[in-house]
Amino acid sequence: MNPALRKTVIAGNWKMHKTPAEAKALLGELLPLVKDAACQVIVCVPFVDLPAALEAAAGTCVAVGAQNCHWETSGAFTGEISPAMLTSMGVSHVILGHSERRTYFGETDQTVNRRLRAALQAGLCPIVCVGESLEQRQQGITQEFVSMQVKIALQGVSREELRRVTFAYEPIWAIGTGRTATAEQAGEVCAGIRATLAALYGKECAQGTTIQYGGSMNAGNAAELLAQEDVDGGLIGGASLKAPDFAAIVAAAR
Ligand code: PEP
């Protein structure tokens, strides 16, 4: 990470875990542990937990995010939540294009692009997830594949809007598997994403964009991953569900 050039961001992705009462309890434990955080801290919680999380985190250094949003403002889209619904509650961040949404719910690079443009238009700060499968890594096409995901996601996104976008490089083979990318692998792909951003928006914009690593990041490996120049934080799944573990990752981002 390079805090002189860009924000360091540690974000928790709670996935489909925690009822509102459990969310309140987890944040009650977490907030005192991260009150002196030297980086930006975000918790991305299930939709039903947003009110409880927003209430618990009000006035603290922790921002609250959702895990997806639709591209329309309203309409006949049963089961969906619009960006405007999120901002109306005070939600500031949203994860888009997580590999679990791509794998299980038919998310494509094109729908990620639509969601991203809508989220930006509504004033949200999106965290856009990209990353290769194990097969793609073994075929040696990781950089091209990730670069293509970044390019499609950003179609129609202005330089000004890019300032609110964070990328999360999440190799699919490392998510929830306990198998972490080496610091070098993470650094290499995050640097590749930055090179793609530089080609699209210029070097200055690219240097200012936060690029996280995600995939079995934990208290034990966070410092090494974050020591990479182009790894500006983490998107944390499993370890974000335990307050001491998540707080230890936040502490590693000093
Ligand atoms: C994630 O869900 O974005 C993630 C990185 O999960 P985990 O930390 O559990 O691998």
Image: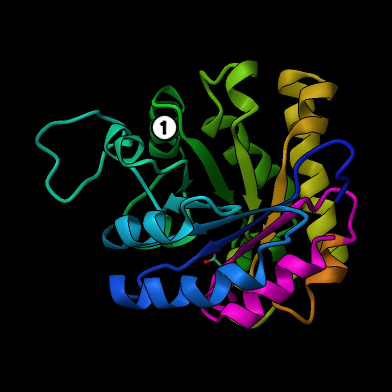
The residue lying toward the viewer, choosing from 46 and 183, is: 46
- Total numbered circles: 1
Q: Residue at x 25, y 29 (%)?
A: 72
Q: Is mark 1 within 8 Å of ligand 1?
A: no
Q: Residue 142's x, y, as percent?
A: 71, 53
Q: Height in image: 252 above or below 198?
A: below
Residue 84: name its quadrant. top left
Q: Residue at x 53, y 33 (%)?
A: 153
Quadrant field for ligand 1: bottom right
Q: In the visual, does 167 lie left or right of 232?
A: left
Q: Height in image: 87 above or below 67?
A: above
User: Is residue 141 at least partly visible in the picture?
Assistant: no
Q: In the visual, does 88 lie left or right of 100?
A: left
Q: Residue at x 37, y 49 (%)?
A: 68
Q: Residue at x 73, y 59 (%)?
A: 37
Q: Which residue is mark 1?
A: 119
Please state the extent of the stretch shown in magenta in the rendering.
Answer: 227-254
The residue lying toward the viewer, choosing from 87 and 199, is: 87
Quadrant where the C terminus lies?
bottom right
Magenta segment includes 243: yes
Residue 133: name its quadrant. bottom right
Q: Residue 233's x, y, as percent?
A: 73, 55
Q: Residue 234's x, y, as percent?
A: 68, 60
Q: Residue 69's x, y, as percent?
A: 34, 43
Q: Residue furthest front?
A: 59
User: Is residue 137 at least partly visible in the picture?
Assistant: yes
The colour scheme used to paint the residues is rainbow
**The residue under label 1 is which amino acid type?**
Ala
Q: Secondary structure at mark 1?
A: helix
